[in-house]
Amino acid sequence: MLLASRPALLRFLLARRVPPEAAEDLLQDLFLKVESQPIGPVAEPRAYLYRMLDNLLLDNRRAAGRRAGREQAWMTAGRGAALDHDDRPSAERQLIDRERLDMVSAALAELPERTLLIFSRFRIDGAPQKEIAAELGISVSAVEKHLQRAYRTVVDVQRRLHEDTPAPRRL
Amino acid sequence: MTQRDQDRLTEAIQWRIRLRDAAPEDWEAFVEWLEEYPERSAAYDAVVAAEATVEPDMIPVRHSPAAFDTVTPGGEARRRRGLFYGSATAFAAVAAIMLFAFVLPWLNATSSRYEIATGRGHRQLVAIGDGSSIAMNGDTRIVLDRRDPRYAELKSGEAAFTIRHDNAHPFTLVAGDHRLQDAGTRFNVLLDESLLSVEVAEGAIVFDPAASRLSLGAGETLAVDDARGRIIRGRQDPDTVSGWRRGQLSFKHASLAAVARGLSRSIGMDIKLDPAIAERPFTGTIRVDGDPSATMARLAATLDLEARRNGAGWLIEPSSRARR
C-alpha cells in the first residue's frame, strides 16, 4: 500500500513546492510514522496517507517558519507563503500576535450566527460537512458556502495584517 | 491584491475545506490544481496559516437574546460540557451544538439584563458590540444588559475584557461591591469569593470612580480583599495578564484554596483540598494546557503534597510521609 502510493505522494509534495531531497525526507518520515503507530481500519487508506502527509508538511513549514523567522529557506524553489517573517523581538511579536488574534475574533464577530455555528462545528469540533448538513437540515453545498465565508474572513484579516506590517499599534 | 490573487485564494479556501474529509480522488484533483500554477501552493499555505490562528474561544457567540432562544435555561452547561469532550456523533440536539454558555432570564422578567454562564473547564468569547469582547474563563457568570452594551457585571469567576474606548460612553464593569470604568483597554478581572483581582494589560481603568477613584495603567494590578478591608496595588508584566487564555495560571500570595478553585475553573474538574492545607500560601505559575493528571502530579510534587483521584475530580492532601 505504502509503496504503491509512493509516486503519487511524491508528486503531491513536488506540487506543494517541496524540493526533491526534502520531499524524500518527508516521505521517509511519513512511512516511519505509519509503521510505528498501529492504525485501526481506515476507510480510505490513500486519503489517509495524503492527509497525514499534508499535516506533516504543514508542521514542518510552521517549524521552519519559526526557526528561520523569514521565508522558509529550504523551500528554495517555491515562493511559499511566509507564515512568519518577522525579526522583531519576541515580546513585541507576542503583543502583535495577540492583537492579531483579537482582530480575528472581532472580524468573526461580524458574521451571522449560523455561519459561526457551522464554522465552529467544522473547525473546532471536527465534524464533517455531511454531518453538519444533516444536523441543520441544509445541503452540504450550503454548509460549504458558510464555511467559505468564515475562512475568507479569517484569511482577509491575515492578509490585511501582512500588508501593513508592522501592525499599527492601538492607543 | 489583484483579482487573480483573490480568485486563487478563494480556490485555495475551497480546497482546504473540501480536503478535510476528502476521498483519494479529491487529493489527486488537488495535485492537478496545484501543478497548473506554481503560485497556488503558496495560496494554500496562506489559507492554512490563517486557519491556524482560529482557536476555540475565538469564535464568538452573539449576546443577542435571539441567539439563545433555542437553549433551555438551566442544567444545560453541564450536559454540553460532556458533549463537548465526547465524540462529535453524540451531538443530538442542534440547538445545543456550540453554545457552551447558557442564558438565564434575569430575575426580573421586565429587566433588560440577562446572565451568561460557563461551566467548569469551558471558555466562551462574547462579542459585546463595536469590536469589544469579553473572554470568559470556566465557572464564570456575567450579567449583560440588552439595552446598554457598555455595562457588564461579573458575578463570579474570571474574564478578560477587551474594550474599545468611547469617551461619550465609558464601559462600566461591576464586580462585587466595586465598579471599574475603562479608558480604552484590555484587562483581566477575577472575582473569587470576597477577593477581587484586577490586572490591566493595556490602556487604563478607573477603580470605583465614585469613591476611591484609583487609576490603574498598563502593568498595574489591584487585589481587593473586602473581608479584610484591604486593597493592595501591585505590578505585573502586561504580557502575562490573562495567562489562563494561554494555559498559564499565575498566583501571587494566593491561598491553596484559591489555587484549587482556579484550577477547577480551567481544567474543568472538581479539585478538593484537605482543610489542613487550604490556607497555605502559594506564589507561582501553573501550566494547565496539558494532561490534567500531569498538571496535578507536578503541582503536588512542587508543594510536597499528594494529589489523588477523587471520583471525577482530585483531592490534594498532605503527603503520606508528612502525615506519618
Image (cartoon, coloured by chain):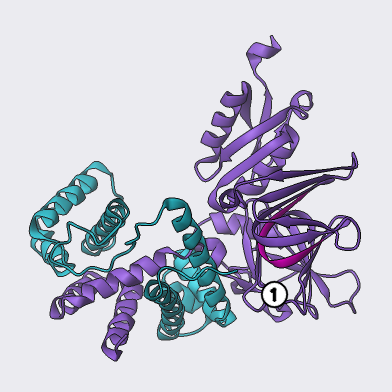
Chain colours: A cyan, B purple
Q: Position of residue B287 (x, y in %)?
A: 54, 41
Give A90 or B294, whichever is nearer the viewer: A90
Q: Quadrant of the C terminus of chain A?
A: bottom right
Q: Where is residue B5 in the image (x, y as percent from the top left)?
A: 28, 84
Circle 1: residue type: His
Q: Quadrant of the N terminus of chain A?
A: bottom left
Q: In the figure, residue B1 lies in which quadrant?
A: bottom left
Residue drawn where x is 67% and y is 78% of the image: B129
Q: Mark 1 — residue?
A: B63
* Stretch of the chain drawn in magenta: B180-191
Q: Position of residue B177 (x, y in %)?
A: 89, 55
Is B58 above or below relative to B158? Answer: below
Residue B163 falls inside the magenta stretch: no
Asked whether residue B22 is in view, the answer is no
Q: Which residue occupies the extreme top position in the image?
A: B324
Q: In the figure, residue B76 lies in which quadrant?
A: bottom right
Query: What secondary structure is marked by label 1?
Result: loop
Chain letter of the residue carrying label 1: B
Q: Position of residue B322 (x, y in %)?
A: 67, 13
Is B312 above or below relative to B103? Answer: above
Asked whether residue A88 is in view, the answer is yes
Q: In this view, does B7 lie to the left or right of B175?
A: left
Q: In this view, does A146 lie to the left or right of B93?
A: left
Is B232 above or below relative to A124? Answer: above
Residue drawn where x is 85% and y is 55% of the image: B176
How many labels, in total?
1
Q: Is the magenta stretch mostly helix, strand or loop?
A: strand
Give A38 or B228, whichever is nearer the viewer: B228
Residue drawn where x is 42% and y is 72% of the image: A161
